Image (cartoon, coloured by chain):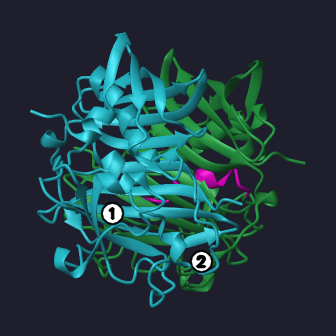
Chain colours: A cyan, B green
Amino acid sequence: MLTSELDADTAVQEIAPGRFRACISDRWNLGAAPNGGYLSMMAVRAITATLPHPDPFSITTHFLRLAKPGEVLVEVERVRDGKNHATAQARLIQDGAEILRALVILGDLSKIDGPTHITVPAPALSLQECTAGWPAPHLAVISGRLDVRLAPGTTSWLDPACSERAELGGWIRLRDGRAPDALSLAFFADALPPPVLNLSIVTTRFVPTLELTVHVRARPAPGWLYAWFRTRALSHGYLESDGEIWDSSGQLVAMSRQLARLNR
Amino acid sequence: MLTSELDADTAVQEIAPGRFRACISDRWNLGAAPNGGYLSMMAVRAITATLPHPDPFSITTHFLRLAKPGEVLVEVERVRDGKNHATAQARLIQDGAEILRALVILGDLSKIDGPTHITVPAPALSLQECTAGWPAPHLAVISGRLDVRLAPGTTSWLDPACSERAELGGWIRLRDGRAPDALSLAFFADALPPPVLNLSIVTTRFVPTLELTVHVRARPAPGWLYAWFRTRALSHGYLESDGEIWDSSGQLVAMSRQLARLNR
């Protein structure tokens, strides 16, 4: 069996207990920098390789310095071991400097139970109603790894008829057919362009993430994911982006929020 | 000048560089346990005492073990120093065990600039339209520290006419007159009962927080705060609670999200 691109490029090799060597690929770049969700997934992979719990429940990632393609060291610290949950931290070190820190809660999504009551609106558009292609292929090497079909009217920088709404979303999957799992939601939660680009007062195209938290709610079914991102408060150049991700069976599988800043 | 209750009870005393002694008060209890936002604020206070940046921008707190009133050690690690932002971590240690870990981005809210575009709905109800008092005074020592006026119909456990909507909010301030500031938003973001209690399928009254992230957007003006909390996805006993906090001048000052779990 061939290893998928995403699995190959987030592979970690243990060189000592809790200490891993990995290689940041340039295949997930946005502009010159590796995608943040891709780096976050690498950190979580090292954590799940260290602890017995199979699934991330909550992933908070701080992007400390610009990463670059090439070798990286991942150091995992076990923070708390529990019956239902464990907590661990991973740090990505490149050229001696910490470039990323992730604080993660782990558990087993196949064993959770309790009441369910969901009022988040389900995907509004079918795959056929969305538009194939990546909105800015010249900027994003990552687009070669993905199939993306975006909702019409959510990409103002391509579509002059687009509304001034800071929302963007649609269907997404890995182009090589690798099915989504709980781990890969760390990647998908940061895989689309920032919805704030739809506002005409925003002139930069670079919106670096300071902090990204992903709550994984269920293991996704195989197939496409539907992801929707929304910014409701751009204030003095800082903004949140809230994401909701559903799987092909209509199950809500993740919610995400990031704090980002318009590049000056 | 008298020290306010919240400042007195989150005071930290440096005993070595980046190492503080503090005392968890029982005046902020919910049931038998100290309120999570109160503990988070104590962690951030130790961080702002260590780094030169005055304001927290992003605060992620993991609640690892039940805290109890009494002595606690706070250890601060400087993760990254930058011109606009710094990142630091604080750990609360009680009886030799880590009970809380906070990862914080700092900066100076008086110096941020850039475009603003906010579509979060502003407070819908005046102070006079809300109901004085805490919804369950027998459960919460913390209620003695607060003035709270909640929106009618958002406390189902008191009001049988309440809708099945997992929303709760209203006006809040510290009873001793201490004005809100950026630091205290770590506390206010977790100071009201969980909105998920409004759902009749929820039978427990105990909803422990696993992870809480607060994004501070502005320094609040003096006076009351208006805080609104909402749960949209309770799934298999796990839930998010999203909060928005405005100040008395109508400015959005914080957004929060937490992952919690219904107690089994």
Q: Give neighbour class at mark 2: few <14, some 14-19, many 20+ (Cα, 10 Å).
A: some
Q: Is residue A71 above or below residue B48?
A: above
The kind of residue on which mark 1 rests is Glu
Indicate left or right for A139 with B146 as reference.
Answer: left
Pick out the residue farthest to the bottom.
Answer: A161
Residue sitting at x 67%, y 74%? B116
Q: Which residue is mark 1?
A: A244
The kind of residue on which mark 2 rests is Ile
Q: Nearer the viewer, residue A20 or B260?
A: A20
Q: Which residues are magenta?
A: B181-193
Disc 2: host chain: B
Which quadrant of the structure image shows residue A233?
A: bottom right
Res. B206 in view: no
Q: Is residue A7 above or below residue B4?
A: above
Residue sitting at x 57%, y 27%? B91
Residue B199, image x, y percentages: 26, 67
* Helix, strand or loop under label 1: strand
Q: Which residue is mark 2?
A: B118
Residue sitting at x 15%, y 47%? A113
Residue A27, image x, y percentages: 38, 44
Indicate left or right for A85 with A38 as reference.
Answer: left
Q: Is residue A71 above or below residue B117?
A: above
